[in-house]
Amino acid sequence: MAVSRSLPRSLRNEGPASYISDEKSQMSVELNEEDMRLALFGSPKQSDPVVLAKPQPSPTSRLNSKPLSLKLRVTLHVTKDFEGDVSVFIYDANTLSTLIAEQEAKKEAKKKKFKYFDVVSVKPIQ
């Protein structure tokens, strides 16, 4: 056994229980809360207090900005007969979604007895 004590701890054949008991005897130091904070977060740095000021709204930014368009104008070419006379159908939708605007325009064209439609354009209006 004298040979195993001269070997490094990792090469000894003593088992894990003796290793744990040796570690416990070396770690008998108790740390207080300040020491733990110092170990985890490092030393506290003294910095100037940060003062947050409320930003003042600029009156010129409101005057120059355009309001969002709340309507889309859908233009359809519609016919009642296949390859018949083409009419232009214009519908103003109260939405920002072009897909919903197209669907509403087609539904309104169906109410007016049109069977065939072709979407020409969907543009925002003011």
Image (cartoon, rainbow, N blue to C red):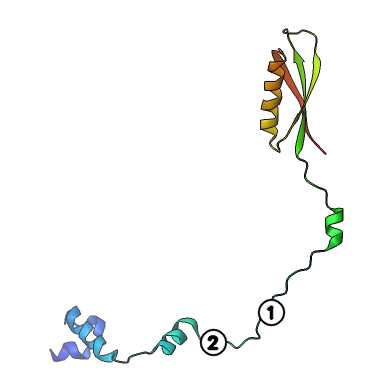
Which residue is under mark 1? Answer: 51
- Where is 117 relative to 95, above or below? above
> Is residue 92 visible in this depiction of the protein?
yes
Crowding at label 2, few (<14), some or many (≥20) Cα neighbours within 10 Å? Answer: few
Secondary element type, mark 1:
loop
Which residue is depicted at the point 63% across and 86% down?
47
Amino acid identity at mark 1: Val
Q: Quadrant of residue 24?
A: bottom left
Which residue is depicted at the point 81% across and 15% down?
87
Q: Is residue 20 left or right of residue 44?
A: left
**Callout count:** 2
- Where is 106 relative to 98, above or below? above
Q: Is residue 14 left or right of residue 117?
A: left
Tell me which label, 2 or 1, sits earlier in the chain. Answer: 2
* Image location of residue 10, percent across then percent down: 25, 81
* Image location of residue 81, percent across then percent down: 73, 7
Which mark is on residue 44? 2
* Image location of residue 37, percent across then percent down: 45, 84
Q: Quadrant of residue 84?
A: top right
Residue sticking out furthest to the left: 1
Distance Cα–Cα, label 2 vs label 1: 20 Å
Secondary element type, mark 2:
loop
Q: Is residue 71 left or right of residue 32?
A: right
* Image location of residue 31, percent across then percent down: 36, 89
Asked whether 47 or 25 is in front, the reply is 47
Which residue is depicted at the point 17% across and 87% down?
4
Q: Are marks 2 and 1 in contact (CB under 8 Å)?
A: no
Amino acid identity at mark 2: Pro
Asked whether 14 or 42 is in front, the reply is 42
